[in-house]
Amino acid sequence: MKKKEDQTVEVEEMNLIERMQAPTPKFFKVVRTVGLAIAAVGGTLLAAPVAIPAGIAAAAGYIALAGGVLTAVSQATVDTSTDAKPSAIEQTQMVSARKRKKPQSARNTKRKKNETA
């Protein structure tokens, strides 16, 4: 799958963990949320403390299954555009890297300012 002439996206070579951590397109984020809501409704019907008819209980199981599948499939989609936002894990790693690269002199200056105040 090509993005541009010189840029190739290696989506086919991603393993499951990389695929789940990759950025998800906006449409599929909405689909994932809807799937979670559907799964919650099915789970609520299955766990209801009152007696419900067998047909509704069976339908609730299928509803929960459909919501789970919808959520999993929508999470596995990958945004291959160049303007895709980094995933939460990538953002955390970038912030950690920035903190580690902060020069020692800047840390000492900040500490000295706090001590004099």
Image (spheres, rainbow, N blue to C red):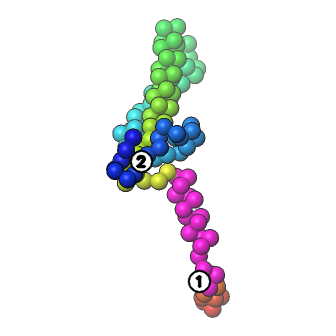
Q: Residue furthest left?
A: 4
- Place of residue 57 in the rendered image (x, y in percent of width and height, measured from the top left): 52, 13
Residue at 55% of width from left, 64% of height from top? 95
Return the residue nearer the eye: 65 or 9: 9
Return the residue nearer the eye: 77 or 71: 77
Q: Residue furthest front?
A: 6
Q: Are marks 1 and 2 in contact (CB under 8 Å)?
A: no
Report how far apart the C-alphas of labels 1 and 2 lie in the structure: 40 Å
- Place of residue 26 in the rendered image (x, y in percent of width and height, measured from the top left): 37, 43
111 displayed left or right of 28: right
Vertical position of residue 38 compared to residue 24: above or below = above
Q: Which residue type carries mark 2? A: Thr
Residue at 34% of width from left, 50% of height from top? 4
Hey, which quadrant is residue 46 in on the image?
top right
Q: What residue is disc 1 on?
A: 106
Region rendered in magenta: 88-105
Q: What residue is disc 2 on?
A: 8
Hey, which quadrant is residue 103 in on the image?
bottom right
